[in-house]
Amino acid sequence: MAITKNKKRDIVTKLTNALAEASSVAFVGFSKLSVKDASALRSDLSLKGVKYYVAKKTLIRRALTDRGYAGDMPDLPGEVAVAWTVGEDTTAPARSVYDFGKKLKGALALLGGVFEGAFQDAKSATAVATIPPVPVLRGMFVNVINSPIQGFVIALDKIREKKA
């Protein structure tokens, strides 16, 4: 059954509003995805604060052109969904889809995304997806700061052992 023009306008409006509030967007290609896997994906993304919406590619493209992002829009072959987040963790949509896609072995793929107001291709989106989450990055930073101090304390302890 065809979608009415009013329904299409509603979908484009919903996508445009979602993109306006989004800090980053990931384009998700899915094929041969079972209902069970799709439900698991939605609940997994929801737990991570990522919103997910499936729409026709033409309507997604129309909403994206309305936003006026920089760069060239990546190709969106096959069935496409949009995952986005609102908040400080801009890597969450790409990382969540990438991690879930590893479990499904080919049924789910990153097709690209929008990061920092510009379109990214699939390769760039995958690079963004491999960035650790913000709490992990903070822990890594603290470890880098702590490492010289820890080395100094160990050296002082070794000197103390020799003198004792």
Image: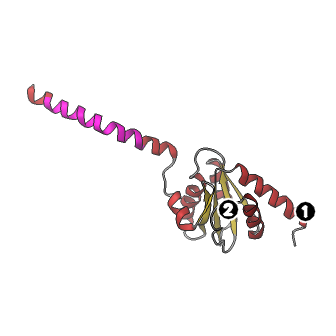
For the question of whether residue 43 can be seen, the reply is no
For the question of whether residue 149 can be seen, the reply is yes
Q: Which quarter shows the C terminus?
A: top left
Label 1 crowding class (10 Å Cα cut-off): few <14, some 14-19, many 20+?
few
Residue located beneath label 1 in the image: 6
Looking at the image, residue 157 sits to the left or right of residue 82; the answer is: left
Q: Which quarter shows the N terminus?
A: bottom right
Q: Nearer the viewer, mark 1 or mark 2?
A: 1
Residue located beneath label 2 in the image: 38
Looking at the image, residue 39 sits to the left or right of residue 3; the answer is: left
Residue 150 position by quadrant: top left
Q: Main secondary structure of the magenta part?
A: helix
Residue type at the position of mark 2: Ala
Kindly report the distance in space between the C-alpha atoms of the residues bearing marks 1 and 2: 27 Å
Q: Measured along the vertical axis of the image, is residue 163 above or below residue 29?
A: above
SS at mark 1? helix
* Position of residue 15 measured from the top left corner of the image (x, y, whole percent): 76, 57
SS at mark 2? helix
Label 2 crowding class (10 Å Cα cut-off): few <14, some 14-19, many 20+?
few
* Scheme by which the image is coloured: secondary structure
* Position of residue 12 measured from the top left corner of the image (x, y, whole percent): 80, 60
Range covered by the magenta-colored residues: 140-159
Q: Is residue 35 magenta?
A: no
Mark closest to the chain's N terminus, 1 or 2 = 1
* Position of residue 9 measured from the top left corner of the image (x, y, whole percent): 86, 61
- At x 46% / y 41%, what residue is drawn? 138
Do tag 1 and tag 2 residues touch (Cβ < 8 Å)? no
* Position of residue 34 measured from the top left corner of the image (x, y, whole percent): 67, 67
The residue most toward the top is 164
